[in-house]
Image (cartoon, rainbow, N blue to C red):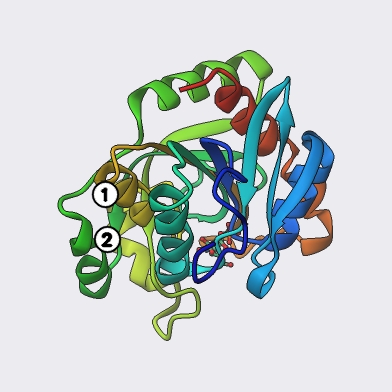
Amino acid sequence: MTPHIEAHRGDYADMVLLPGDPQRAEWMARTFLEAPRCVNSRRGALGFTGLFRGQPISIQATGIGVSSFLIYAQELLDYYGARTLIRTGTCGSLSAKAKLRSLVISQSVRPESAQSGQVFGLYGTAAGPDPTLLARALAKAAELGIEHHAGLTLCSDIFHHPDGRTRFAEAQAAGALAVDMETSALYRIARHFGASALSICTVVDNIETGELTDYSERQQLFTDMTRLALEIAGEGR
Ligand SMILES: O=P(O)(O)O[C@H]1O[C@H](CO)[C@@H](O)[C@H]1O
Ligand SMILES: O=c1cc[nH]c(=O)[nH]1
């Protein structure tokens, strides 16, 4: 076990999907995995291991933001030997292209601020997704007819900000499709451990228009993202 995970070594698969929300982790595991087994409930950060088409896959909630994310990612990579991490998150759209309920696949990511830079500086220079996972995701999403966009995303440390949406102007001018709060940390820590990573997020609100999805519709909302992540995870490393 680790300070934040009560599972034994060997309880996690090499391949781990990482939603932020523990309720999403449970829904994904119970809906899509065969024989899902809860391997962590410490602090309510639920983790599950089961089978997808006969192959072991784990799903671990990471909480909100870089600080929480890095705890779970570090312990999975360093202690439990995870080799592939796929974030199955939510994001806010910063672009008319990234429609509500569609998927954004992060092809490159920039941190929002100097504070982010200091945290991410622990893991060296900027990093991106694993090219093989990215190529698989793009091909599978097209094959399955899943609405998606791939491109630059922004990773923020702050959800409620006194400057509101004006703080995103520079990132929008640079072409950022959407904002989340973990992707930059995912790519950097994965590179540090020589692991493969990809971030896929479902758009749950549009920061320009103020459109919002409701939490109650979120389970159906995550079907495409979960199917896509499992399909590409199911192809192995
Ligand atoms: O829904 P998750 O995966 O937690 O992702 C997004 O939602 C949270 C903010 O509401 C942040 O963690 C952000 O990155
Ligand atoms: O607006 C949003 C929605 C989800 N996640 C974020 O970080 N921001």
Q: Which residue is mark 1?
A: 174
How far apart are the two marked residues, 2 and 1, measured between alpha carbons?
6 Å
Asked whether residue 148 appears in the rendered view, the answer is yes
Q: Horizontal placement of 157 versus 12: left or right?
A: left
Q: Horizontal placement of 26 versus 180: left or right?
A: right
Q: Is residue 47 above or below residue 226?
A: below
Q: Nearer the viewer, residue 143 or 126?
A: 126
Where residue 2 sits in the image (x, y, percent)?
50, 65
Quarter of the image with the C terminus in it = top left
Mark number for residue 170? 2
Say what amino acid the circle numbered 2 marks.
Glu
Residue for point 62% across, 13% down: 143
Quarter of the image with the N terminus in it = bottom right
Residue for point 27% across, 42% down: 191
Q: Are marks 2 and 1 in contact (CB under 8 Å)?
A: yes
Q: Is residue 101 above or below residue 123?
A: above
Where residue 156 sits in the image (x, y, percent)?
38, 66
Asked whether residue 181 appears in the rendered view, the answer is no
Q: Is residue 230 above or below residue 127?
A: above
Q: Horizontal placement of 222 versus 106: left or right?
A: right
Secondary structure under tag 1 reads loop
